[in-house]
Amino acid sequence: MEVKDYCNSMASELTAWKAKLFDIVAQTDKLGTQDKEKVWEYFIEMKILVQDLEDKIDSLRTECPSEWSPHKKEIEDAHVDMRSKYQDTIEYIGKAAPHSIPG
């Protein structure tokens, strides 16, 4: 896969992740103050990961290195980490307000 194709694909995925993060923010409105604070910690971590991924992808787009496998591995590892943090957040929200959060 070409670097440009990979970056475009990852950029699309990041856009989807950003939408998920905004959904989490909207869902926190249904929680009490203490639960909101806990979810906010998860959200901040995910937001940092999204920014880091955007920076790496922008770097690949602009530098277009001939050997980009190490960058790809970093991006994929961060993507897995973000997915895990997202699942943790959704689970926490579900425990805090199971009646208001759809599957």
Image (tube, grey):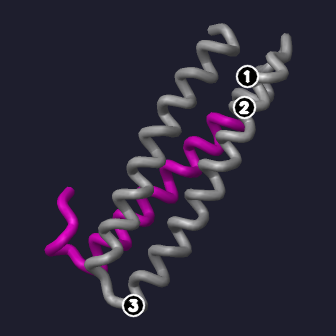
Look at mark 3 in the image and give the residue it sits on.
33
Secondary structure of the magenta portion, mostly? helix
* Residue 57 painted magenta: no
- Going by the image, does 48 lie left or right of 32? right
Discs 3/2, front: 2
Q: What's the distance in space between the residues labelled 3 and 1, CA to CA?
A: 41 Å
Which quadrant holds the N terminus?
A: top right
Mark 2 element type:
helix
Residue type at mark 3 is Thr
Q: What's the distance in space between the residues labelled 1 and 2, CA to CA?
A: 5 Å
Residue at 66 percent of width and 41 percent of height? 53
Look at mark 1 in the image and give the residue it sits on.
61
* Spot occupied by residue 87 in the image (x, y as percentages of width and height): 41, 57
- The tally of labels here is 3
The span picked out in magenta is 74-103
Above or below — where is 57 with respect to 45? above
* Spot occupied by residue 102 in the image (x, y as percentages of width and height): 18, 60
Q: What's the distance in space between the residues labelled 3 and 2, CA to CA?
A: 37 Å
Above or below — where is 67 with respect to 13? above
* Spot occupied by residue 56 in the image (x, y as percentages of width and height): 74, 36
Given residues 95 and 30, the one toward you in this image is: 30
Mark 3 element type:
helix
Residue type at mark 1 is Arg
- Going by the image, does 52 lie left or right of 25? right
Residue type at mark 2 is Asp
Look at mark 2 in the image and give the residue it sits on.
58
Mark 1 element type:
helix
* Residue 91 painted magenta: yes
- Going by the image, does 60 lie left or right of 96? right
